[in-house]
Amino acid sequence: MASTRFLCLFSARTALARAGYSRVCSRRSVCSSPSRLQSCMSAWVIDQYGTNGLLRHTEEITIPTISSASEVMIQVHAASLNPLDISMRGGYGATVLKLRRDPLSVMNTDSEFPLILGRDVSGVVVDCGAEVTHFAPGDEVWAAVPPWKQGSLAEFVTLTEYEVSHKPKLLSHTEAASIPYVANTALSALVNAAGLCRDSSSNKRILITGGSGGVGTFSIQLLKAWGAHVTVTCSQNAEGLVRGLGADEVVDYTAVNVADQLEIMEKFDVIIDCVGGDTELWAMGLLKPWAGAKYVTLVTPLLHNTDSMGLLDGTFNAVCNLQSKAIQNIISNGVFYRWGFYTPDGPALDEVSRLVDAGKILPVVEAQFPFAHVPQAFQKLEEGHARGKTVVRVADEDDRQAEEMVQHGHTETAESEQKVQETVKQN
Ligand SMILES: NC(=O)c1ccc[n+]([C@@H]2O[C@H](COP(=O)([O-])OP(=O)(O)OC[C@H]3O[C@@H](n4cnc5c(N)ncnc54)[C@H](OP(=O)(O)O)[C@@H]3O)[C@@H](O)[C@H]2O)c1
């Protein structure tokens, strides 16, 4: 046991030193418990599922060193939050994610706690496994951390090479951290589920419901870069933002009957539903019938079902639900009904990185918080009405800046929003 701990300390420090991270090494905290030989990092964790009050800052999480030849260890500079973090904090998806983390967990009582949330990372590579070919220590990278892995609200995160991508050169870490998870989700929904791609989207009519949030603000820009015609539903006070990002038509769902308003428009080739609920009841009829049109919802009952009914019953119920809707819609209108899911995909982020550096996709950072204020960042997200993304600055140098920003409170958030609007206008 002692030798394992020593190896952990040795490999973490060697990796960091190799990458020229003596500054980082010097501020590694060393656990004062009996396991003091382990090198530890700072992280926000939960020890049980529940509310924001359960988020706990600790300096005693073991650094996630490289454990397989294809892994890349990243020093986190910035992370961002997604609605999934709020849900996972409350236990959403626990059944499936626990099994995905450890397929033998059904046989034992090993706990997933302490659990680190945070799905986006922008940072710097500090160590690579022997088979990693695309990355080297010192590379600036970004990635979306799969929900079954320890998250990015920590000083270090370790991912497989396939999940990681070189960060766009034009973006700061704070800006870059706002993109990977929504980008991987949007690309999976648009490409895998809706069958769109750069060369097949020109002049296609796409409707995005909930266009003012993280997935929506990214999807608008990607689709416009691909030449599509984009219609968006959002609140009235988000209209300037989504139009600035390129939306061709905007329907304020708070002012009018959104279904009636969309009904009088030309029908759509694809609907990406970021709202869920009863949207599909009125939105299916907005698609072009018998023309290969597709409805893709990101709000699916799969994990809710497995949480409430158990793995087998929940999955069976969800699959039956999906199949019956898919069959019903194809028979009655000739439209495809599909579910969209986040999929880890570093090469897809490479493509996004090129679009960002070409000025075709802008980060939409609504609010940013220092690492010390992670619970406040969760609270902001939980209040809803997102206009883009909420980012957490994790690394020291970024943290000090963000601490000052939080002292300015809402002023900073308002300025941040204004900056997005101005940047959007300039582009
Ligand atoms: N399946 C997956 O793998 C996956 C992956 C990522 C996200 N998701 C899900 O997809 C959804 C969107 O994600 P996100 O990150 O974009 O969320 P988000 O950042 O919280 O954005 C949601 C946006 O929708 C707006 N909105 C709320 N009700 C609306 C309505 N009835 N019509 C139009 N707009 C409405 C909100 O603003 P206002 O309330 O001010 O209008 C907000 O701007 C979430 O439910 C998320 O859990 C699923």
Image (cartoon, rainbow, N blue to C red):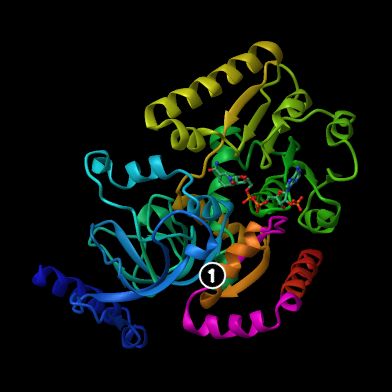
> Which residue in the rendered view is the most extreme toward the top?
331
Quick check: is 400 in the magenta stretch? yes
* Magenta span contains residue 326: no
Q: Out of 274 and 60, give the one closest to the viewer.
A: 60
Residue drawn at (36%, 88%), measured in percent from left and top?
23
Residue drawn at point x = 59 percent, y = 15 percent: 327
Task: Report the span colored magenta.
Answer: 383-412
From what the image shows, is residue 31 above or below residue 115? below
The N terminus - image quarter: bottom left
Q: Amino acid at mark 1?
A: Val
Q: Position of residue 396 (x, y in %)?
A: 48, 83
Relative placement, left or right, of 167 versus 275 is left
Q: Tell me if residue 35 comes above or below residue 340 in the rendering.
A: below
Front residue (pair 108, 385):
108
Figure quadrant of residue 301: top right
Please give left or right for residue 351 compared with residue 413 in the image. left
State the residue position of label 1. Answer: 374
Residue behind label 1 places its C-beta within 8 angstroms of ligand 1: no
Give residue 118's position: percent from left, percent from top: 48, 60
Q: Is residue 188 left or right of residue 69?
A: right
**Which quadrant holds residue 393?**
bottom right
Res 169 seen here? no
Quadrant that contains the C terminus: bottom right
What residue is shown at x 76% (from left), y 75% (from top)? Answer: 415
